[in-house]
Image (cartoon, rainbow, N blue to C red):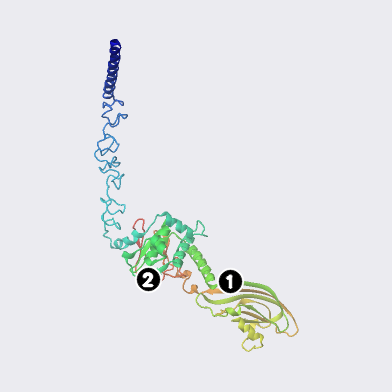
Amino acid sequence: MRKIVVVLVGVLLISLCLMSGCSENTSKNNTVKDTDGDGYKDAVDAFPSDSTEWSDTDGDDIGDNSDAFPLDANETRDTDGDGVGDNSDAFPNDPSESHDADGDGVGDNTDYYPNDPTRWEQQSSDEFLVTAQPFLNKLDLDDSELRTYANTILTGCDASSTECFVNALYRDVIMNYTCLTAPMNTATLQTPQQTIQRKQGTCEDLSILLCSLLSNLGLSSYLVFTNTHVYAMVSDVNGDDLWNVAEQSLLEFVEVSFGEPLSQPIQQPVTLNPLDILYVGGLENQTYAFSGIIDYMTIEYTIESDQPLDLFIVGSQSDFFILKNGDLANFIPLEEWLQMTTVTGTSPQLDTYGGFILFNNNETHIATANVNLLFKFQPSFYGTYNKNKMTVYTLGGKNAVLLDPTAGDFGFPGYDAEIVGVKKAIDPQTNHYATLS
């Protein structure tokens, strides 16, 4: 019995000894292990698998050897080496700048007005440049949204027609934007985007919009200053081509407003019984006198008949009914229109929508005639808005025209409404300017 107890105790002591020995060996291995071989034991190495790092003083998971700011957990890099961490550096790639107090994109070191986001350049000693700068600052010469907006206006323009581009943009502004009459005021100037949103602005605002749209299409644009207003200008255009596209757009505008084509041909054979009369022209509900958009109408005619006819020019269809009722006293044809068989010419100018009356003044014979008429309406705008009123300047050796956004619905590029005073055109890209003459 005593032998058994001794054996059990011995086995127990041996087991405890073995367990104790194993634990002591493991602990000893850990304290000497250096996985990455950098001389720092794993127990004290913050990066046991990276032989280039072992400490992370600021606890930002970037080793002190790689951390440009080992004592600042918010910074790790200084790309431009200016001593300011990239996370805090407003210009991480510019060693000369690190702060932008007013958020205008210009570093405080070069910003002459570091607390004013509307200006940053040193004030010029040139009085004109000082005057022009607030307007130039509102221009946006390279903006994808403005470029897209401008291109939507150019529908129908040939891609090579600068003149069509200019006219389309100008017409869009004068037709779709309200021009507010107000003195020049730099404090209330709008950006192009604000003007587009509000669909209105002062002469200066609309000119800033025009200049910006032209520039975003790659066209050479300018701002033109007088003592009282600011206008837009575009260069490198052909004056004749520009007037042609402008005139066509004005004629189209008149036709839409008038409600009828400005040129209306009528070609038809007619038969007139003895003592019969025929009227060709405007209807009775169109007897109104022209005013506003139409000055007068004329009728170009060629009439051939197998029997002599009398021809009358009348101011309305009502006159036809008077004549038809036998009242000939007020209807005396010109001598060359009396008892004619063939006649060609142009009628006098009519201030109402009238027409022709053909009268077969024969009591026995039927007359057969071929009637070719062309009714032509003269738009009123030619009295003021015509090619002779287009002013073409020379700017930088190229033809340039003024764009006046206050000219109204019938204005056109190059229309210079007797703008008085010295006109100075400034290139917004270079700030170079010239006096126009």
SS at badge 1: strand
Q: In this image, 165 relative to 73: left or right?
A: right
Q: CA distance from mark 1 to mark 2?
A: 37 Å
Image-quadrant location for residue 18: top left
SS at badge 2: loop
Question: What amino acid type should be assigned to the residue bearing mark 2?
Answer: Thr
Residue 99 in the image: state x and y as whole percent. 27, 49
Residue at 56% x, 74% y is 377
Residue 8 in the image: state x and y as whole percent. 30, 14
Neighbour tally class for label 2: few under 14, some 14-19, many 20 plus, Cα within 10 Å: few
| Residue 229: image tag | none
| Residue 181: image tag | 2
Residue 288 visible? The answer is yes
For the C terminus, give its image quadrant: bottom left
> Which residue position is annotated with label 1?
263
Do the CB atoms of the residues marked 1 and 2 lie less than 8 Å apart? Answer: no
Residue 412 visible? The answer is no
Tell me: residue 335, above or below residue 243. Answer: below
Neighbour tally class for label 1: few under 14, some 14-19, many 20 plus, Cα within 10 Å: some
Residue 390 in the image: state x and y as whole percent. 45, 68
Residue at 31% x, 60% y is 133
Q: In this image, 39 relative to 214: left or right?
A: left
Tell me: residue 131, above or below residue 264. Answer: above
Question: What amino acid type should be assigned to the residue bearing mark 1?
Answer: Ser
Residue 34 in the image: state x and y as whole percent. 29, 25
For the N terminus, give its image quadrant: top left
Whichever of labels 1 and 2 marks the residue nearer the N terminus, that label is: 2
Q: Nearer the viewer, residue 312 or 202?
A: 202
Q: Nearer the viewer, mark 1 or mark 2?
A: 2
